[in-house]
Amino acid sequence: MKTYILSNGIKIVHKYMPGVAVSHCGLILKFGSRNEKKTEHGIAHLIEHCLFKGTEKRKAFHILSRLDAVGGELNAYTTKEELCVYASYINQYYERAIELICDITFHSTFLDKEIDKEKEVITDEIHSYADNPSETIFEDFETILYPNHALGRTILGTEKSIKKFSQKDIQRFLNRMMDTSQIVFSSVGNIPYVKFEKLIEKYLAIIPEISSSDKLNTVSKFKRDNVELKKDLVQAHCIMGLPSYPLKNEKRKVLVLLANILGGSGMNNRLNLNIREKYGYTYSIESNYQSFIDTGNFNIYFSSETKNFDKIMKLIKKELNILKSKKIGATQLSLAKKQLKGHIAIGHDNNSNLMLSIGKSMLYFDEVESIEGVYDKIDSISAASLLEVANEMLDIDKFSSLSFIPKK
């Protein structure tokens, strides 16, 4: 793997993988919905949509057809802290993918007539999202954790907020946020380093250096809150948790392991075994941990029949108290570490995921840690450190909560 920085500040990471038939690359920009002012709610996501609607030399049809016509895929996403444009394609179209991604990222025109079309598309997306309580509850919960802060607002925006945006609003936001030192171009695929570097020189080294004066709007002190909403639903939904460790905190990996033990993606996690499997009270129960630049979010989510709601809450509290009061045994700890390392390995086996993962690592840490280095950090986690983090993070009496309860 090779990493370097261009004279304009753009960071480059490329992993050469000879023998693979499909390659992947993308630009990751370090701004997202958390960088929006109150009057800009939803504009980062709108920009993501409008990147596909026309550049100085291409119309929407030509953008959409450029890779699709040769069996490739062009896509983008917006998070609270990033905007990413990426592509997958067979190897012979490496240059086509790089050129197209650079064109739509740096040369989109954002014509008002095209913006208006995407406002309708996003409105439909908002309506579709609202029909899924298991998704909306996560966004709504962040409003409780981060009140009066952009992290607490939805990425999509609202129907009202996106209607007013124009080309001038988009350009104003991009002029404020665009910073070439906060951009990474990531690549994983079957192209030798020398050939790859020539393409980078051709399409990315020519981008002028751009600096941003925008300052991070830090999160205020957490205040516990518990909210219950009556909704037209069949099942009850509940999410509970609290702010947690930020991205660069040394306890972050300990909490990742702890969340995996408690309610991670494996079917053998404690919440699943001791609530779903033992009693059949719920189909869906999980714990999650997401880190941001200056904070984090640990939560537990479940859905159930209303009659089982209180029973599940008592069982969750029981599992949390066990993790807070008893050191995990050596055998259990070893198995938990092996499981987490296996999940990481499977994620890295998908080269598109790997491309995004190493790109984000370069964006936030200015380096890409080897998978062996990640394994070493996991292996260094002790039962004592898990117990310490459990007592910091798993006190249910300190949790905020949001519940969607079916109307009777």
Image (tube, rainbow, N blue to C red):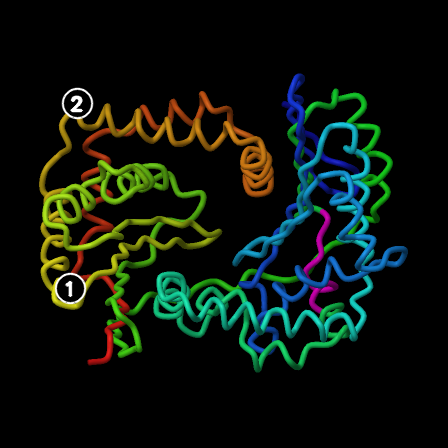
- Residue 105 painted magenta: no
Secondary structure mainly formed by the magenta segment: helix
Residue corresponding to mark 2: 331
Q: From the top left corner, tell me how far across and down residue 406 is, in percent.
A: 24, 75
Query: Residue sitting at 16 percent across and 41 percent down?
Result: 273
Q: Secondary structure at mark 2?
A: helix
Is residue 161 found left or right of 242 in the rendered image? right
- Residue 175 painted magenta: yes
Tell me where the magenta segment starts and ends, as one range: 173-180
Vertical side of 171 occupied by 276: above or below = above
Label 2 amino acid?
Thr
Label 1 amino acid?
Phe
Mark 1 or mark 2, earlier in chain: 1
Q: Residue furthest right?
A: 57
Measure the C-alpha gap from mark 1 to mark 2.
33 Å
Residue corresponding to mark 1: 309
